[in-house]
Image (cartoon, grey):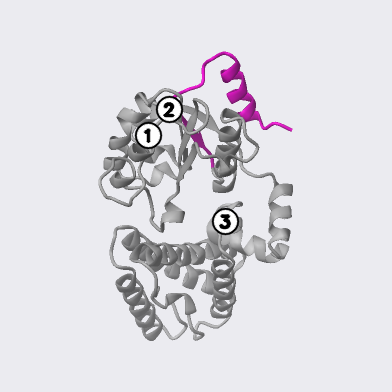
Amino acid sequence: MTSPFLNRIQLESQRNRVADAYLLLGNSRIRLRSATEEIAGFLLSTPTPMEHPDFAVLDPAALGIQGLKVEHIAHRKEGVESVESLLRFRPSEGDSRIVALYEADRMGPDAQAALLKTAEEPPAGTTLLLTAQDSAQLLPALLSRCRIHRVPSLTSEEQLRRAASMGLEDSDYLILQSALGNTDAPLELSTSDRQVLLSLYQGFREWVADPSAPMPWLYPPEGGKLAEQREDGQRRLGAILGWIAELYPQLPSGTADRLDRTAQLHLVALADIRGQITPGVVFEDLAAQCEAAVTSDGQGL
């Protein structure tokens, strides 16, 4: 069964109205990536687009970065694949070529600006496929050069099937949904990241029941690149805020007040880590504030 957005692309193709650049917009990174592959497969007439020599993907996750940079758009560094280097030669097979740029909304303004000319006038036969979850993060000039197609999230049935295939119990899946604020996000995490969050949830619930219990999510992120530590830190802080929001209406007033004060401290820390303050510093400050709050209040935060 052909998906609705692919139906639209096929109709545009029949009318010779395929755009030079498309923006696939939606909440689900899983669906955005599969939609990109579907469109690439159709335009390149292949059931296996990922194996086709004329389908190139620039993926921040695969590169270990938060978002594509200028050097991934314009050729600046030897050994760094870029849109410009990919378009230097004609397609290997036929006359069509697809270049996908995942998570375009995480690109900085300078990288987006570097993409404007190519998005407006790519080489003949080239189609750019950009994905994004938040169009507000894209330059208006870049948006104006793209034909936008909205890609729906996975259905509830699809989510549950995928979760089960990953060995996720329904209860754990719901815990991760609350942590990440997105129904598809748990399915995009690595197994180790899911296990870390589920372990933190157990510690969180113990702390809710007993304010003197440890707060294991406050250990500073360690290992990996700074961007990975920042992402880990944001995920942990966001998880605590998500779990607090879910539990808050069910709690007695004293516990609810404690969680409200905790949420305020964590919101400030989340803003700091997003503001490029070193993750280790953010977590050290947050732990100190939480400890000071416990010391000043015999009932805990």
Q: Point out residue 124 in the picture as x, y percentages from the top left corner.
A: 41, 22
Identify the mark nearer the N-term, 2 or 1.
1
The numbered disc on residue 188 is 3
Q: Is residue 80 left or right of residue 25?
A: left
33 shown above or below 294: above
Q: Which image quadrant is residue 208 in? A: bottom right
Residue in the picture at 32% in, 47% down: 69
The residue under label 1 is 87
Identify the mark nearer the N-term, 2 or 3.
2
The residue under label 2 is 146
Foreground label between 1 and 3 = 1
Spatial CA distance of label 1 from label 3 is 30 Å
Identify the mark nearer the N-term, 1 or 3.
1
Q: Amino acid at mark 3?
A: Glu
Q: Point out residue 156 in the picture as x, y percentages from the top left corner.
A: 70, 48
Please name whichever residue, 278 or 120, is drawn nearer the observer in this view of the structure: 120
Q: Amino acid at mark 2?
A: Cys
> Element at badge 3?
helix
Which of the image's four quarters has the N terminus?
top right
Q: Which residues are magenta?
A: 1-26
Please name whichever residue, 75 or 106, is drawn nearer the observer in this view of the structure: 75
**Local crowd size for mark 2, using a 10 Å CA cut-off: few (<14), some (14–19), many (≥20):** some
> Element at badge 1?
loop
The numbered disc on residue 113 is none
Which of the image's four quarters has the C terminus?
bottom left
Residue in the picture at 42% in, 76% down: 218
Residue in the picture at 34% in, 82% down: 292
Please name whichever residue, 287 or 165, is drawn nearer the observer in this view of the structure: 165
Q: Tell which residue pokes out farthest to the front in this image.
A: 92
**Local crowd size for mark 3, using a 10 Å CA cut-off: few (<14), some (14–19), many (≥20):** few
